[in-house]
Amino acid sequence: MTPPAVPAALHPVVAAFLADRTAVHAALERFGSPLHLVFPQVFDDNLAKLTGVLDRARCRSRIYYAHKVNRSAAFVRSAARAGIGIDVASGAELRSALEAGFTPDRVEITGPKGSSLLRAAVAAGVTINVDNLWELARIAELADTRVPVLLRLSGFPGSAPSRFGIDLGEVEAAFDLLARHPDRLALLGVAFHLDTASTQERVRAVGECLTVIERAYACGFTPSVLDIGGGLRQVFVADPAAYDAYDQALRAGLLGHGPALHWGTGSFGYHVADGVAHGTPVFHKYANTDSATDILTELLDAPLPEHGGRALSAVLADNLLDLWLEPGKALADRAGITVARVEFVKRAGTGATLVHLDLSRDTVTAADQEVLIDPLVLSEPGESAPAGVFFAGHLCLERDLVTQRQVRVTRIPDPGDPVVFPNTGAYHMDLSAATAAMHPTPPKVAVLHRDSRFELCDDEVWR
Ligand SMILES: *Cc1c(COP(=O)(O)O)cnc(C)c1O
């Protein structure tokens, strides 16, 4: 049996590029393999869709693109040109934002920060999204003018414990610090970031934040911003039924009720006991069918119980609060792909077919996940003979299997065939990428669709 296919959702611009085999081969010949391709037009399209939702809700809002999702300079420049803000989380990201033309009032710095990063942030005059009380005190020491700060809060009832943010129980101590340094610290507002698909969880966090804002007013501060972070979801699969069919076949294999689709003793987070695969698989995010715009719409329309059931967007407008968002993956969704070439194909002792590629797993997979959308093999036209294969990486490590699951291919690829990893733009291509065994990280190239042609440009110099 060959495994069921799990086709990826492709943006029309990316689909058109992949359909133009001459363009794909030209990219590989000019820049080599493997290659990361980013599509700024898809980024723009994602941004326009989110902006559309915010405009319809009529609340004052500002989007800060979360830079950490991708190192791409083209994405940063697209965000700068669109007039939105940027959320940076390191000194290099801060420099990248300023070089792309962001003025300090459009830059927000989040994440854990040591003294040197705080010094750079204070010197640049950007807004600091404060993670903890040490940081707040340190900013007061470093500042010589008023530094705009947001208090990142955490410890919301019903949310998973977080290593980030100021616990709700520490808010009074933060207010004390702010009150002691009115000439150095300006409380712009409060913030949170929850990596969840649950609207209910975000609504609860918003409710807690509004209470903190009321307390801040009672203490004489005048915060005007509620920053709800990122976490809006991507849609990876073209057809949710295909995902379900694959998941079912995979579980049947794990239970010994069907052919094994998994490699070795891997179980993808499933725990097999009593003839059942229990638990949540590591690839569960690929099952999502709610788009970022759906999730944002639902959130803005959600009734707030402590505010007479009025919609969240209306409560913010009533209270003259600005809504800030920090989307990362929602803006990079379907805006990046990675292309590699087949080096050779071999049969393992287990009988499995291994298609060896010229890249490693960490180049297309973030951390300990397993990608549950299929790579696309761009073979020359020929006879169809479907098969299940594992894609293997070029590192001399057992764990460097690019897919630890069998993938359906229409026939066994030949050396040199391009293999496309769809939707790698958000975290997949950059977050875990290493230079193990002295392999360089792949070059990154921006692709522009213009006059029904595709123009390629080194990502670093794209304008
Ligand atoms: C990572 C991160 C984001 C972006 O998250 P996405 O899930 O990619 O939207 C936003 N804000 C903060 C503080 C983050 O750490």
Image (spheres, rainbow, N blue to C red):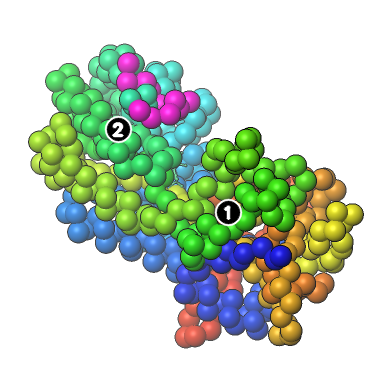
Ligand 1 within 8 Å, label 1 CB: no
Instruction: Give the residue type that dot 1 points to.
Output: Gln
What is the chief secondary structure element of the magenta stretch?
loop
- State yes or no: discs 1 and 2 in contact (Cβ < 8 Å): no
Residue at screen point 18% across, 46% down? 313
Q: Quadrant of the N terminus?
A: bottom right
State the residue position of label 1. 248
**Residue 214 figure quarter:** top left
Residue at screen point 71% across, 73% down? 386
Question: How far apart, in angstroms, are the residues tagged by discs 1 and 2?
Answer: 35 Å
- In the rendered view, tell whether residue 428 sits above or below residue 345: above
Q: Can residue 254 be seen here?
A: yes
Residue at screen point 67% across, 45% down? 255
- Residue 38 position, x and y percent, is 55, 64
State the residue position of label 2. 205
Say whether residue 365 is left or right of residue 310. Answer: right
Q: Which residues are magenta?
A: 158-169
Judge whether residue 161 is colored magenta: yes
Local SS, label 1: helix
Instruction: Give the residue type that dot 2 points to.
Output: Ala
* Residue reaching furthest to the right: 349
- Residue 56 position, x and y percent, is 20, 59
